[in-house]
Image: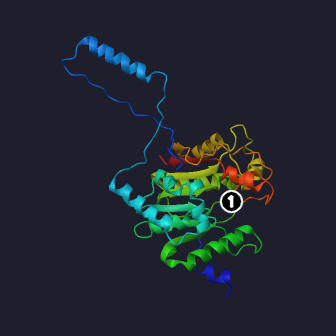
Amino acid sequence: MNDRSSVSAQFSRSSSSRGSRFWRGSSSSRGWSFSRGASSALRSLLFCCLCAGCAGRSVPATETPAGAGTDASRSVDAKLVAALAGPQRTDQERARDRYRHPREMLELFGLTPEARVVELSAGQGWFTAILGPVLAEKGSLAITLADPHGPPDAETTKGAVALLARLAKDPASFGKVKPIVTSPNGDTPLGPDGSADLVLTFRNLHNWIQAGTVDKVLATSFRLLRPGGTFGIEEHRARADAPTDPKAIGATGYVPEAFAIALIERAGFKLVTSSELNANPKDTKDYPSGVWTLPPTLRLGAVDREKYLAIGESDRMTLRFVKP
């Protein structure tokens, strides 16, 4: 039995921190009270001092992930720490944690050990290797991938075969992960309506836009999520004035943030958090080979390699939406 046929037996085909985290939101107000014996003059003086102290400075708007500080948040945090250090991850994957901030991002998206999670377009399994162990005991994880029986020379086929082989090689970490092969047109059913708590995807929106399947993928995700469920997305962020036509987005790999939000909200989702967790101000977004000029791809090889390594991985938006 060849590699492709052996790994294909492992899946079921569907038939149907960078320091502080700056998250857009409303800052909380602080209440002040005075003792009953304070004179009106003293109260006026104190009020003026408070106003003067606050004038001219802005308070960063921050949010704390839901449940932070609770037993549930401590539980997922401990499992994330263990998964990040686990042997199911490669050294190359761990080396990228400083760019990708997986622990902080998954906490932002509201991951819990009991969650029912679907990861769209899992790629080489970078996040699957973290999500799988966290969810193995009490939660569930399904991942989507291309057809491993597709054209043999296609990168999508090779990627699917490699990912399935990785899952099969480590059943202790990935034995409960459910792979779902999706069709190229983006309308493969992923489960019963309302059956997922989180639908997550990392650096894939540009591919769906280029392929013309983005509306179908988002509609499927919306149906899959329960009311109140999270759609979490990380994507390479283009300049605000960058073109939004599929050809340009496919060529560069970058998507304007406002355009991405409009697409996703058009599908029925509501934006609740926009994070600068994965921002990179060094990224000028004007490279010969688009985002793939930067690490980890470094498509230009030795040409200006040190320059691109110094920039690091791309500037990325990190967005959390909910299904109303």
Horizontal arrangement in the rendering, residue 143 relative to residue 301 (left or right)? left
At x 76% / y 73%, what residue is drawn? 151
Q: Is residue 249 above or below residue 33?
A: below
Q: Residue furthest top?
A: 41
What coloring was used for the rendering? Answer: rainbow
Taking the image as drawn, is residue 212 in sight?
Answer: no
Residue 199 location in percent, x, y? Answer: 53, 57
The quarter of the rendered structure image containing the N terminus is: bottom right
Residue 202 location in percent, x, y? Answer: 60, 56
Q: Is residue 195 above or below residue 162?
A: above
Type of amino acid under label 1: Pro
Q: Residue furthest front?
A: 306
Residue 21 location in percent, x, y? Answer: 50, 44
Residue 4: quadrant of the picture: bottom right
Q: Tag 1: Cα neighbours inside 10 Å, few (<14), some, or many (≥20)?
A: some
Residue 263 vs residue 277, the one in the foreground: 277
Residue 127 vs residue 103, the one in the foreground: 103
Residue 94: quadrant of the picture: bottom right
Secondary structure under tag 1 reads: loop
Taking the image as drawn, is residue 160 in sight?
Answer: yes
Q: Is residue 47 above or below residue 131?
A: above
Q: Give the residue at mark 1.
A: 296
Residue 72: quadrant of the picture: bottom left
At x 70% / y 76%, what residue is drawn? 149
Residue 301 location in percent, x, y? Answer: 79, 60
